[in-house]
Amino acid sequence: MRDTDRRRRAFRLAVLVAGASMGAIVASVSSIAQPAPTPTAPAPVPPAPTSPPRAPTAFVARIDLTVADLEARAAFFIDALGATRGITATAASSPQLGSLLALPNVSARTTTLRLGNETLGLRQLERARGRAIRRDAASRDLDFQHVAIVVADIDAAWRRVIAAPGIRRISPAPQRIPDDNPAAGGIRAAYFRDAEGHPLELIWYPNGRGDPRWQRRTRASAIVLGIDHTAIAARSTDASRRFYVELLGLQVAGTSLNSGVEQQRLSGVRGARVAITGMRGTSGPGVELLEYQAPGPGRASASSSAADLAHTETVIAVADLDATIARLREANVPMLAGAPSPCIDSVCVNARSRAIVVRDPDGHAVRLEGR
């Protein structure tokens, strides 16, 4: 090899060694002069796939109100909202009725009211005097339960309702849920109490909201289109959802978080932020849970008797009554009677069924009917 080539190779090797040494020095200085890089957070673990919701096996057949004056309450729904009256009957005192309601020697007058395709029941008990609904009852109290009545024109319906004797407004006027609410934007609603204090809701659904049938007008003159749901105050959504879904057989249909001035005016609760969970059965109205995240739940249920006017029964028809009762007993669910009673025609939805009244985690009454 010539000397010239040796010198060139030696020079290139020296350059490479010097560059490597300088790189090590720069790296070392950089590590001293700069803080150590912050470790990156691990990538979020995607949630495990969930199984599809269980198909419902039960349905809400009717909602029954306990009233002090059957004729006056029926007249309100007929005159103000255009309900159609069904059969009015008397259930004489009997062991079956006494056992069902845990009220010995009681008798009852009942009537049904047709609102669209749904039915509302009214029951006036004889020889059993219950407590009136508190004048200061609030929408966040845990005995709160309203019936949501769908109307074709909420402004016209509201004018008719507030003109009726004894009506007390909860909402000052119909409220519109803001459009930025992804689940309920555009819906209009208003709460009020009838002359006996039962809370009720008028609700109007715009196109694309609610059941599609609420956009179908069967009669141009119709005031009421039907009953969409009954809504109940709940201390814990999880506990109540387990009761209605896992024990009774309904299915979660949707959720919403409502807040802001419109929700405050609707419910009459200052600072209201309400987590709403809607549940449905195979047919019929739904059940909505209202958990007041702010300002928190109100008073616990004061109703302990089926004679109290706050005693509203959500009637749920189940496919297998005995299996349902077994699940409820295992979960230590309170029941008004130790065993189901044969149904009475004027009290039950299906006279050929058996029935038992149980209470949900917050004390709301549920009458189960089934074979």
Image: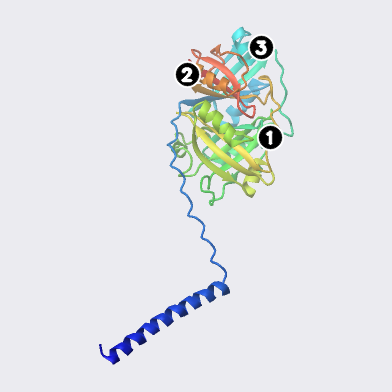
| Residue of label 2 | 320
Q: Residue at x 53, y 66 (%)?
A: 37
**CA separation in Å, label 3 and label 2:** 28 Å
Q: Which mark is residue 106?
A: 3
Label 3 Cα crowd, 10 Å radius (few <14 / some 14-19 / many 20+): many
- As shown in the figure, which amino acid type bears the numbered disc 2? Asp
Do we see residue 82 in this rendering?
no
- Where residue 112 appears, as percent x and y from the top left, is 55, 21
- First-in-chain label (3 vs 1): 3
Q: Residue at x 48, y 54 (%)?
A: 43
Coloration mode = rainbow
| Residue of label 1 | 141
- As shown in the figure, which amino acid type bears the numbered disc 3? Val
Q: Quadrant of residue 365?
A: top right
Q: Secondary structure at mark 2?
A: loop
Label 2 Cα crowd, 10 Å radius (few <14 / some 14-19 / many 20+): few
Q: Secondary structure at mark 3?
A: loop
- Where residue 25 appears, as percent x and y from the top left, is 50, 78
- First-in-chain label (3 vs 2): 3
Do we see residue 7 in this rendering?
yes
